[in-house]
Amino acid sequence: MAASTRSLMDTIAARPGVDNQQTFDALWGMLGALFDKVAARFELQPDASTADLQPYHAIDGSGAGGNLSTFSGPEVDWLVFSWVGNPKASFSNMHLTVSLSSKIDAPHLGLAFGTAPHLFFYMDFIPRKDLAANPSYMDSYYKELNEEHLRLHENPAFTAFVSRSLYMRVTQTAASLCFTAEDSAENLATLRDTSARMVAQWLANVEKAPAMPLAERPALAARDESVRRAIAERDPMNALVERMYGAELTAKLVKALWGGDRALPRPA
């Protein structure tokens, strides 16, 4: 199985002017369908803190833009549905991340699709426990994801992406799906089918998850927000976003990803 440690920043810099609008549209359509599935399951309320980010635009005159929507609800601490970049100039990145409330003992959902300028994607069930110390938790929630992980590693069309950031790798599980590929119709179809199965399995995980004991919920909520914040603030792509959108807007975008300016209260 091929693997690459070349940073996304470097691959974009090597091919800065690729028009990926068609691929972007396909990916955004996929992610939108997955968001609809999640929204059909949970009671969600838009958070007013990101109303002015729907949409936003770059300051460098490049035509880059973005849209960032956030939600919360009784069972969802923080949901992000967003895109950023310039699909006509190689780079785009989009997210659907769902952080569950501390009452539910199941992993979070993390999805990221994009072009750099090749097809890129990351998908994982973001753990809330040490999997090595909690093997029964791993067995309960990660069996199907591990099968997807192995299936893609055995597919020669996909190259495993190894982040150069140690922290980004630490936050991934051993079953995560993090790959690059040519943006062919066949590879996009594989991504569509794989992501649909993954979200269906995650929703099934939520349904079977036991309730967290009341005494353990405050510590879990604090851990969830701390990890979410560190992931947002340590993302290596923040440097590219800052060049396109400026320091002030980038800081607001990063803060929105972890809920630092949220208007809605966290679930009780």
Image (spheres, rainbow, N blue to C red):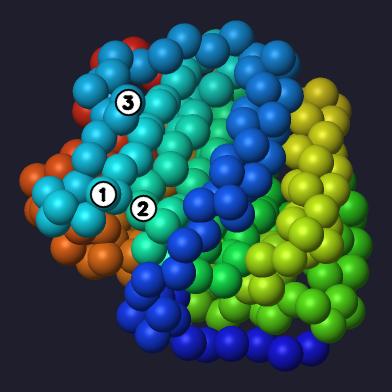
Say which mark, if any, is on residue 54.
Answer: 3
Place of residue 239 in the rendered image (x, y in percent of width and height, measured from the top left)? 23, 66
Three-letter code for the amino acid on which mark 1 is drawn: Gly
Residue at 88%, 79% in the rendered image:
154
Place of residue 49 in the rendered image (x, y in percent of width and height, measured from the top left)? 26, 21
Whether tag 2 and tag 3 are in contact, CB under 8 A, the answer is: no
Q: Quadrant of the N terminus?
A: bottom right
Place of residue 52 in the rendered image (x, y in percent of width and height, measured from the top left)? 23, 23
Give the mark, 1 or 3, whose residue is nearer the N terminus. Answer: 3
Which SS class for mark 2?
strand
Disc number lying in front (1 or 2): 1
Say which mark, if any, is on residue 85.
Answer: 2
Query: Does the rendering let one see residue 137?
Result: no
Give the mark, 1 or 2, whose residue is nearer the N terminus. Answer: 1
Which SS class for mark 3?
loop
Q: Which residue is mark 1?
A: 63
Residue at 43%, 54% in the rendered image:
87
Query: Does the rendering let one see residue 64?
Result: yes
